[in-house]
Image (tube, helix red, strand yellow):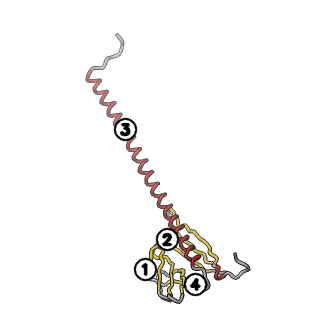
């Protein structure tokens, strides 16, 4: 006989119960850890997607504005004017032909970029405006050299970022040959 004591049936059942409880506890701990990692990863992915969407919307806004300016670049058509509705500058494209006359306003209001067609000299209204894309802000500046600097603001995380582009209007270019 060996010097050790043999476990009885009740002792074996008790040891198995302790082992079972320990395994279940470890599995529960492992499950909670995995669940926490999945939730954290999903939150991170959602935040990154929101940031990229905001950046994409800002690029879309800037591209839209630049295309509209290039489409309408002819003498005396494009202006930057203050807009009473927002208190900020807006782009005004004046269209005057034999058949029709209207102004196209491009402006930002309440975190949205809008375009609005109005009668000549009339200011835009939000009700008649076409929503282009969501952005934090938009500021056009007409320089003395005939260029328009467009700056679009957006939120990237908690920080406000901006994208800018400069369009040199052919209709106002005065320095040398322009190709």
- Nearer-N-terminus badge (2/3): 3
- Identify which residue, 142 or 156, lies in the foreground: 142
Q: Quadrant of residue 96?
A: bottom right
Q: Position of residue 29 (x, y in %)?
A: 38, 41
Relative to 8, is 32 above or below? below
Are the residues tagged 2 and 3 within 8 Å (C-beta)?
no
For image coordinates 49% across by 62% down, the residue present is 53
- Nearer-N-terminus badge (3/4): 3
Q: Where is residue 64 in the image (x, y as percent from the top left)?
A: 53, 72
Circle 1 is placed at which residue position?
Answer: 126
Mark 1 or 2: the one toward you: 1
Q: Residues within 10 Å of mark 4 (few under 14, many from 20)?
A: some
Element on which disc 3 rests: helix
Mark 1 or 3: the one toward you: 1
- Nearer-N-terminus badge (1/2): 1
The CA span between labels 1 and 3 is 58 Å
The CA span between labels 4 and 1 is 23 Å
Mark 2 or 3: the one toward you: 2
Q: Residues within 10 Å of mark 3 (few under 14, many from 20)?
A: few
- Identify which residue, 61 or 15, lies in the foreground: 61
- Nearer-N-terminus badge (4/1): 4
The CA span between labels 2 and 4 is 27 Å
For image coordinates 56% across by 68% down, the residue present is 162
Circle 3 is placed at which residue position?
Answer: 27
- Nearer-N-terminus badge (2/4): 4
Using residue 10 as the reference point, say whether residue 159 is left or right of it: right
Q: Where is residue 11 in the image (x, y as percent from the top left)?
A: 28, 24
Relative to 158, is 22 above or below? above
Relative to 162, is 83 above or below? below
Using residue 105 as the reference point, say whether residue 12 is left or right of it: left
Element on which disc 1 rests: helix
Are the residues tagged 1 and 2 within 8 Å (C-beta)?
no
């Amino acid at each position: 006989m060996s010097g050790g004591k043999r476990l009885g049936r009740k002792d074996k059942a008790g040891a198995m119960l302790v082992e079972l409880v320990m395994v279940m506890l470890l599995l529960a701990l492992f499950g909670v850890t995995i669940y926490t990692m999945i939730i954290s990863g999903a939150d991170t992915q959602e935040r990154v997607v929101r940031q990229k969407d905001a950046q994409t919307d800002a690029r879309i806004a800037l591209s839209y504005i630049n295309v509209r300016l290039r489409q309408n670049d002819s003498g005396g058509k494009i202006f930057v004017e203050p807009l009473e509705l927002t208190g900020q500058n807006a782009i005004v494209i004046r269209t005057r032909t034999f058949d029709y006359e209207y102004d196209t306003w491009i402006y930002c209001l309440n975190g949205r970029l809008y375009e609005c067609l109005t009668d000549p000299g009339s200011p835009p209204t939000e009700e008649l405006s076409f929503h282009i894309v969501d952005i934090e802000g938009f500021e056009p500046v007409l320089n003395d050299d005939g260029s328009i600097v467009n700056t679009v603001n957006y939120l990237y995380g908690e920080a406000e970022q901006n994208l800018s582009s400069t369009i040199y209007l052919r209709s106002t270019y005065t320095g040398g040959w322009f190709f």
